[in-house]
Each structure stands twice: as C-alpha cells, then as structure tokens.
Image (cartoon, rainbow, N blue to C red):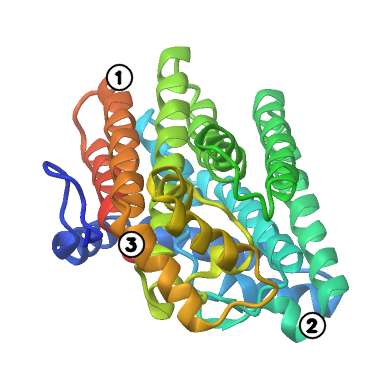
C-alpha cells in the first residue's frame, strides 16, 4: 500500500514541524501586525456581522494570503507600515469564500469547530460573506491605486467562476484532471497569485518582478490545494479541521479519486462509483474508497504533482536576489509539501 510522503528531494513530513516552527519564528512580527489590522477593520454597526465575522476569523486560519502579500511587498523593497491593512483584503476574501462554500456544501464542521451556518443559519452566513467581499473592495479603493483594484476585481470574478465550475462538476465522477485543475486554479490559486502580485504592485516593483511573484503565488496555490485534497484521503479530523473523506461525501471528484478511477480495475471502479453516487455513505464505505485510492496511487500521484508546482514556485523566485524574505518564501513553498493541516 502506498503512503502519504513527499517525493524524494522534497521535505519529509517528519521535518514539517521543524520547518513550520522556523517559519513562524520568522513571521511572528508580520502576523501580529496582520492580526491587529484584522481587528481594526472587522467592525460594523450591525452586531451580527461582527459576531459571525470574528467567529470565522478567529477559528484557526493560517493568514497565509495576507502574509504572502506582506512578504511580497517586502521582497520588492517596501519598508513602510501600510501593507498590513491592505493585506487584510485577502483574508476577508478568503473568509467570505469559506462562508459561502459551507452553505453550498451544507458543511457542519470548519476548522474542527461547528461551521458558522450551523450556528446562525444559511441566510445570515451568506450575507456576512457578502459584507466581507464588499468591505474588501472598499478597503482596496481607499488606496487609490487603479491597478491594484483591477487585479483584485479580476481575481474575485475568476473566483466566482471557479465556484460555478465546481458546482457544474459536482457529483460528476467522470471529471478529468484538466477540468479539476481549472477549478482549483480559479478557486484557490488565483487569490494567492493576486496577493503576491498586489504586494509587488504596492511596492512599485518592475514588471518582471510583478510577474515572477504572480507566478509564484499561482504555483504555490495549486500545490496547496493538491496537498489539501490528498490529505482528505489520509489525514485526520484534527489535521483537516473537517471530517475525513469530506470531499467524497460532498460529491467532489478531486485528483486522488480521478487518478484512482483511471487506474483501478473494472471491479474497483464500480465499487468507487457505487459509494460516490450513494445517497448516504457509511464510515466503512468511506474507508474502503480511501484505501482503494491509496492503493491505486492516487495520493502519491497528487503529491508528486504538488511537488512539481512547488518546484516551479521556487524557480519563480530566481528573479530576486538572496535575502531573508526570499528564504522565507522558499521555506513556505517547501512547507506546503509536508504540512499535515
């Protein structure tokens, strides 16, 4: 049986905690500034908005997207203190997406806690998500930079398209790898790409560096989602912050399952199809499919693809001279491969 492990020449899972500790030690000042900015901007005269907003914001998010924006601007030479406020835009957009996703998916758990929609209901959660989207755009407008606003507007449009694409492919076991990659590009990678690109624009970096960071964020985002989807077949509830096998139960054919369907024999394909299309799945059903996906190489293939995108992300940083910030962005790319949460 195959196991979840990073390919040769990439950081192993056993080194993940050390790498994570090193990263967090380096970014602690930036994270503190980001957290302070989130608290400043997460306010409304409508109490329910602030209550739901704080619930999702304080439920264990990594702040990866705002951090990427801050580090990208720093890599391009920015030395001021207005970057943290702009970076909050990316956390608000991400949180809004999570709120909307949980409603669409009828989710019950998010980051090991009850999903917001289970506490306040779907209408309230959708509307709070809309508030976060609107607040993000307003915060961006206040910077009086048309290029930043254009990039962000294009990004939110592509994210919405990604949500619709995922809905179209919902419960479709015949989804192929190309269609799946298009969904994760739009749903996950474009926001990370925008965070890095806007960091470069904010720092008034030359076009070549802006493109390099945009590509870094896109490749990193794809790798991040690939690992997330692989973990759904090997992780635990504590690691994932949601039920194990959640994608399968929600009718999402992600890359591990797509690969398994393409390489399993007819009997096992029928078994996967039966479980995937069942109105209700038992824990035993989920475990059986997870085992088949691992045995057919679906998890290993997904991790290998993620490693390829991490390599490309790191190569994008060749456009920059060596520096502590560049080393930190390289570490973040490596950590994506060995993270367990």
Q: First in sequence, mark 1 or 3: give its number.
A: 3
Quarter of the figure with the N terminus? bottom left
Residue at mark 1 to residue at mark 2: CA–CA distance: 47 Å
How far across and how far down the image is residue 9, in percent?
Answer: 11, 41
How far across and how far down the image is residue 54, in percent?
Answer: 65, 75
Q: Secondary structure at mark 1?
A: helix
Q: Secondary structure at mark 3?
A: helix
Residue 149 seen by the camera: yes
Q: Are marks 1 and 2 in contact (CB under 8 Å)?
A: no
Disc 1 crowd rating (10 Å Cα; few below 14, some 14-19, many 20+) is: few
9 shown above or below 278: above
Residue position marked by numbered label 3 in the rendering: 28
Q: Is residue 246 left or right of residue 260?
A: right
Q: Camera-side residue: 232 or 276?
A: 276
Which quarter of the picture shows residue 120?
A: bottom right
Q: Is residue 260 left or right of residue 53?
A: left
Q: Residue furthest top?
A: 207
How far across and how far down the image is residue 13, in percent?
Answer: 19, 61
Q: Residue furthest left?
A: 9
Q: Are marks 1 and 3 in contact (CB under 8 Å)?
A: no
Residue position marked by numbered label 2 in the rendering: 120
211 shown above or below 151: above
Look at 66% across and 77% down and name the residue there.
280
How far across and how far down the image is residue 337, in percent?
Answer: 28, 50
In the picture, the disc for residue 319 is 1
Q: First in sequence, mark 3 or 2: give its number.
A: 3
Which quarter of the picture shows residue 315?
A: top left
């Amino acid at each position: 049986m195959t196991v979840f492990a990073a390919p040769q020449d990439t950081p192993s899972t056993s080194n993940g905690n050390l790498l994570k500790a090193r990263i967090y030690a380096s970014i602690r000042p930036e994270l503190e500034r980001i957290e302070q900015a989130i608290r400043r901007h997460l306010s409304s005269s409508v109490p329910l908005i602030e209550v739901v907003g704080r619930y999702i914001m304080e439920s264990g998010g990594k702040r990866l997207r705002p951090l990427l924006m801050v580090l990208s601007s720093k890599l391009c030479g920015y030395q001021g203190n207005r970057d943290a406020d702009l970076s909050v835009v990316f956390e608000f957009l991400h949180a809004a997406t999570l709120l909307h996703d949980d409603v669409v998916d009828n989710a019950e758990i998010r980051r090991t806690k009850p999903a917001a929609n289970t506490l306040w209901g779907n209408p309230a959660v959708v509307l709070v998500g809309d508030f976060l989207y609107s607040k993000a755009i307003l915060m961006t407008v206040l910077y009086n930079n048309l290029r930043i606003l254009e990039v962000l507007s294009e990004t939110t449009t592509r994210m919405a398209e990604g949500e619709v694409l995922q809905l179209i492919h919902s419960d479709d076991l015949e989804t192929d790898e190309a269609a799946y990659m298009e969904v994760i590009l739009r749903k996950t990678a474009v926001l990370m790409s925008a965070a890095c690109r806007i960091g470069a624009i904010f720092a008034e970096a030359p076009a070549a560096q802006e493109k390099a960071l945009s590509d870094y964020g896109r490749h990193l985002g794809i790798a991040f989602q690939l690992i997330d989807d692989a973990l759904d077949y090997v992780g635990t509830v504590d690691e994932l912050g949601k039920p194990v096998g959640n994608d399968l139960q929600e009718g999402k054919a992600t890359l591990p399952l797509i690969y398994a369907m393409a390489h399993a024999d007819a009997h096992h394909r029928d078994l996967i199809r039966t479980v995937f299309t069942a109105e209700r799945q038992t824990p035993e059903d989920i475990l059986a499919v997870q085992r088949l996906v691992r045995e057919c190489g679906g998890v290993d293939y997904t991790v290998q693809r993620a490693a390829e995108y991490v390599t490309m992300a790191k190569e994008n940083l060749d456009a920059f001279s060596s520096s502590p910030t560049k080393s930190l962005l390289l570490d973040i790319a490596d950590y994506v491969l060995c993270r367990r949460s």
